[in-house]
Amino acid sequence: MPTQISLLVYKGVPVDFSKYRHTALHALYSDGQYDWLHAVGAHPFFKFQKDTENPISEPPIAWIPVCTVPDSVTREKIICACACTPVRNGNSDRDWNCQNWVGEALTELVKIGCLTKEERGVAIGKMVEIILEAELEDVVNLCHATTWETSTTKFLQRLQ
């Protein structure tokens, strides 16, 4: 069985907003072993992490097949490409997160011949679709504000 790369999307924590959805790459190697490859932490403490077990207590909400890896691309090359993908912790990178890292890691994997630009584009498109299915933060905040405003108005009307 050839090595397979997949992109995983996890439900957002502490709330399921798009910006909190965690993403990771999953490599299933030809010998049956596997790694989770991802950026973990929060600004300014992001770091690359390789796990041999699911690092999240919940299963992913999406498992997106990315590619079948050519035999010429070894496990070591895959791990090295991901480990060498920069994590961004600078002041100008406050909006950067694991979702950006996955896109950049896939670019590094394209460079080593692990997948094509087209496969990367398809995977990123599917990842974005799944991420955008999360609750909309502005809508949730608006609903809470509207509920609070309605409740406050009704309460004040009762006092009159």
Image (cartoon, rainbow, N blue to C red):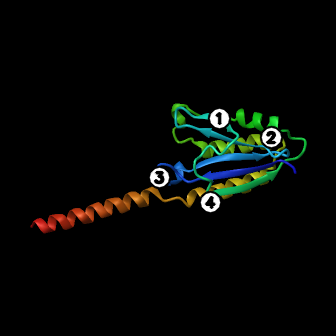
Which residue lies at the image location 58% right of the left edge and 56% below the top edge? 131
- Do the numbered discs 1 and 4 sit on residues whose CB atoms are within 8 Å? no
Q: Is residue 45 above or below residue 145?
A: above
Q: Secondary structure at mark 4?
A: helix
Residue at the extreme right of the image, as rendered: 72
- x%, y% of residue 11? 55, 54
In terms of depth relative to the viewer, which is nearer, 86 or 53? 53
Q: Quadrant of residue 101?
A: top right
- Do the numbered discs 2 and 1 sit on residues whose CB atoms are within 8 Å? no
4 or 3: mark nearer the eye: 3
Q: Secondary structure at mark 2?
A: helix
Residue 15's disc number: 3
Residue wearing tag 1? 48
How far apart are labels 2 and 1 at the CA level?
19 Å
- x%, y% of residue 39? 62, 39
Residue wearing tag 4? 129
